Image (spheres, rainbow, N blue to C red):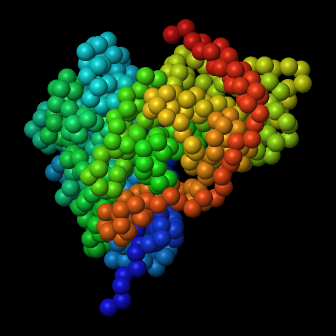
Amino acid sequence: MERKRTIIAALDQGTTSSRAILFDGNLEPIGMAQRELTQHYPAPGWVEHDPMEIYAGQYGALAEVLAQNSLTGADLTAVGIANQRETTVVWEKETGRPVCNAVVWQCRRTAAICDAILRDRALTDTIRRATGLLPDAYFSATKLRWILDNVPGAQKRAERGELLFGTVDSWLIYRLTGGREHLTDRTNASRTMLYNIERLCWDEDICRALNIPMQMLPEVRPSGADFGTADLGGVRVPGRGGAGEQQAALFGQGCVDEGDAKNTYGTGCFLLMNTGARLCRSEGGLLSTLAATDGKKVQYALEGSVFVGGAVVQWLRDEMGLISDAADSEYFARKVPDSAGVYIVPAFTGLGAPHWDMRARGAVFGLTRGAGRCHFIRAGLESIAYQTADVLRAMEQDAGGRLSALRVDGGASANDFLMQFQADILNRAIVRPRCLETTALGAAALAGLTSGVWKAGGGAARPAVDRRFEPDMDPQRRAQLLKGWEKAVSRAGSWTED
Ligand code: ADP
């Protein structure tokens, strides 16, 4: 009998779209379909998604990519999921119907709940120690608390076992398996602020303190594990891998050894470093979290996020009108030898890691009469690299080692000027893979490894390199530029009164 060709479907459920990408046995992408996801903003600072649209869009994208390639579910070896993290869904166990819209990771509606937690020093310490996170509206726990408080009868129904909680992966698994499975993986659990990353279980103390009924929490499995079988048009396809998108990208970049790190240059920047079996606790404002592994092995990661990365280029385009296309930023930045002393600090929503200054605001420093459009654009791109350098410095201090090369992905990593400047400012090599779909690649690699398509390490081998950028800057000049940046950041700090 002819041996079935390996085809793995990666479901990449992101904040703005749901994509399905098919990979062959060499982890080469062979097809992709995408559905946009509607963003709902019911009040200032609130962000919601319709969970049924998430599911329908994700299922639709998968059906489309299969049809485009004249395939059916029967041709698939396995399915892997990578998803937007922290976003919270609550649904009825009996019907699978959501009780309200999903509360998205960006949503700040629970800031007051977090302030109350932060006033309780003992609880804040417990959360830090158990989950590796700092209490913040970003994580799922207070979003779940809000739903239980605000959907009529939800707390009582949850206590009776009638309602289930899940991050987006759990929700998709529940729907795809026809309600047979209520599961999540460790990386997603580690972003809920309810999961003990040392003991690898839901934390009873935190659940009690927040009055979260534990029977509504999903069972947690390693990222490379059996996640039931998905019903695809009457065919059952094994679900074999799942991870939050940043951890999936770390795995997809082949960062599976202690000290490996990647930075994703999307709207924001997400820098993750694998710290191996070591749960490294940050002194410098970074988060500790679980990394995705293809088996029972437990690995941790340090994570630092920058709120405004590629978004500064969008700002230059949409608000300042200095470019008409994000990619043009490279052309204009190269037209000048330097930024003429101009620094842009894009602290539009405050500063994230490692500064954590919610009251910082965007600022431009160093303007002189000769400063022009190209200097401005160049300063915008340089700000992405400076912010990354700040996070990496904090990370190396926490991890106690020096990174030899930084792997990159995400939309803005296509910018060669930015990548070279990043290498120069960090004084180390930047490695950009050929396939920038590292999130989907990570999910596919996890699913393939768990299915036994490759031996451990095989599928997660480092993706093919597109380009390596070597540092090429005079150390004195680097020090001078960094000194200017430091000064600019400190002056943009604590800008708003409250
Ligand atoms: P996300 O997944 O967060 O939506 P993407 O990985 O798709 O983000 O990257 C999009 C971001 O990258 C946008 O903010 C855009 O401004 C920026 N970007 C895209 N291409 C370039 C480029 N060639 N140079 C600089 N920035 C870019």
Q: Is residue 139 above or below residue 161?
A: above
Q: Position of residue 421 (x, y in %)?
A: 71, 39
**326 sits left or right of 79 in the view:** right
Question: Is residue 191 visible in this depiction of the protein?
Answer: no
Query: In this view of the protein, which residue sits in the foreground, 69 or 125?
Result: 125
Residue occupying the point 18% across, 40% down = 216
Residue occupying the point 55% across, 33% down = 392
Q: Count all numbered tags in the image, as a single digit.
A: 0
Q: Position of residue 243 (x, y in %)?
A: 37, 50
**477 sits left or right of 46 in the view:** right
- Quadrant holding the N terminus: bottom left
Question: Is residue 476 visible in this depiction of the protein?
Answer: yes
Q: Position of residue 12 (x, y in %)?
A: 44, 55
Query: In this view of the protein, which residue sits in the foreground, 109 or 3?
Result: 3
Q: Is residue 111 above or below residue 35?
A: above
Residue occupying the point 47% across, 60% down = 461
Q: Is residue 72 above or below residue 141?
A: below
